[in-house]
Image (cartoon, rainbow, N blue to C red):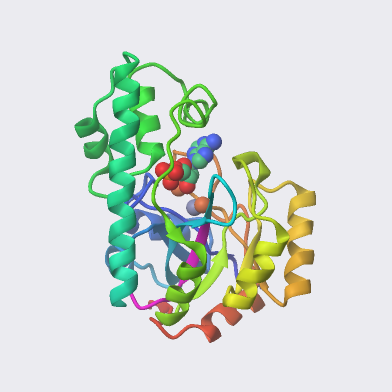
Amino acid sequence: MTLRIDLHTHSKASDGTLGPAELVRAAAGAGLDVVAITDHDTTAGWEPALRALPPGLRLVRGAELSCRWYGEQPPLPLHLLAYLFDPDHPELVTELARVRAARAARGERIVTLLRADGVDVSWPEILAGAGGGTVGRPHIAQALIRAGLVATTAEAFGPDWLGERYRLPKEDIDVFRAVRLIRAAGGVPVFAHPRATRRGRIAPDTLIAELAAAGLAGLEADHEDHSPAEQAHVRGLAAELGLLVTGSSDFHGTHKTVRLGAFTTAPEAYERIVAASSGVTEVASG
Ligand code: AMP
Ligand code: FE
Ligand code: FE
Ligand code: ZN
C-alpha cells in the first residue's frame, strides 16, 4: 500500500483551529502515514506535535514562510514551505520573529481601518483569539464573524473586507533570501500553491526558474486552490526545472473546508525532501 503523505497543515500555532497535538491525532485518524506541520512563520507547534505523535505516524517539522518578490510593483506576496530546517538557525529565527511582529503590526492597522469605518472589532480580542499563535487575517475574519458582519471566513476574504478593501501588505521576507536561509538552516524549500490565480496575482514562470537556480527544491502542484489545468502547468514546469512536486491539503481546521489528506504527495517526492534535508530529522513514533 502506498503511503498517504500530507505535507502542508496548520495548527493553532498559526491560523489553524486544532492544537498541534490535536492536529497529529487528527492526521492519524484521517489515515495519514506522514504529516507535516507547517504553521505560518513559526516553529512553536513542533514540540507539542512531537510529544503527542501517535504510533505509526511520521512527523515532518516545517513552516510556511511569508515571502515577497520585489521584482514587481507592488511587490508580490508568496509562500514558501520549509521542511526539516534547524529551528535554532540564528538568522532564520530572527527573520521569523520579525515577520511575526510585522504581522501583528499589520493586523492592528487593519483593525484601526475597520474601526474608523465603525466596525466593532477590537485588536485585544483578535490577539486573544489567536491564542499566542502567529496572527493572520483568518483571526480578523473570526472577529468579523463574531460581530455578525459576515457569515463565513470565505466571505471575510471577499473584496469588501480582508480580500481588498481592508487588505494591507505586511513586511515579509525577500523570497530569494528566504530560499537561501532555509537551505543554510539545512531545510528544503518548496513553493506553496504557486499557481493559485484565485488568490490573486501569481509568480511568473521566469521567477520560478530563477528561484530554482537559487535553491528552490520543489513546487506544490496538487492543492485545492489550483484548477486541474493549473496543477498540470505546475507539474510541467517542475519537470522542466528538475523540481520535485508535492500535493497537500493546506488544512486549517474549521477556518477552511478542506480535509486532511484531501491532496497527497508521492512517496518519491517525500523521500527526496528527507534526503535533501539536514536541519532536523523526520520523526517516527512507536
Ligand atoms: P495572512 O497570512 O494574514 O495574509 O492571511 C492569509 C491566510 O488566510 C492564508 O494563509 C490562508 O490561511 C487564509 N485564507 C486566504 N484566503 C482565504 C479564503 N478565501 N478563505 C479562507 N481562508 C483564507
Ligand atoms: Fe493560513
Ligand atoms: Fe499559503
Ligand atoms: Zn498554508
Does the magenta segment cover residue 83? yes
Is residue 253 something one can see in this rendering?
no
Magenta residues? 79-87
Say which of 222 and 113 sits in front: 113
Q: What x and y, as percent, mark residue 233?
A: 78, 58
Q: Quadrant of residue 25?
A: bottom left
Residue 109 placed where, x, y %?
Answer: 31, 34
Q: Residue at x 35, y 37 (%)?
A: 139
Left or right: residue 70 versus residue 253 is right
Quadrant of residue 130 within the rendered picture = top left
Q: Residue at x 42, y 53 (%)?
A: 10
Quadrant placement of the N terminus: bottom right
Q: Is residue 74 magenta?
A: no
Residue 169 image offset from top left, x and y in percent: 43, 42
Report whether 132 appears left or right of 31.
Answer: left
Give the left or right position of residue 116, taking residue 85 as reference: left
Nearer-the-camera pick, 181 or 274:
181
Which of the 4 quarters of the picture holds residue 40? Answer: bottom left
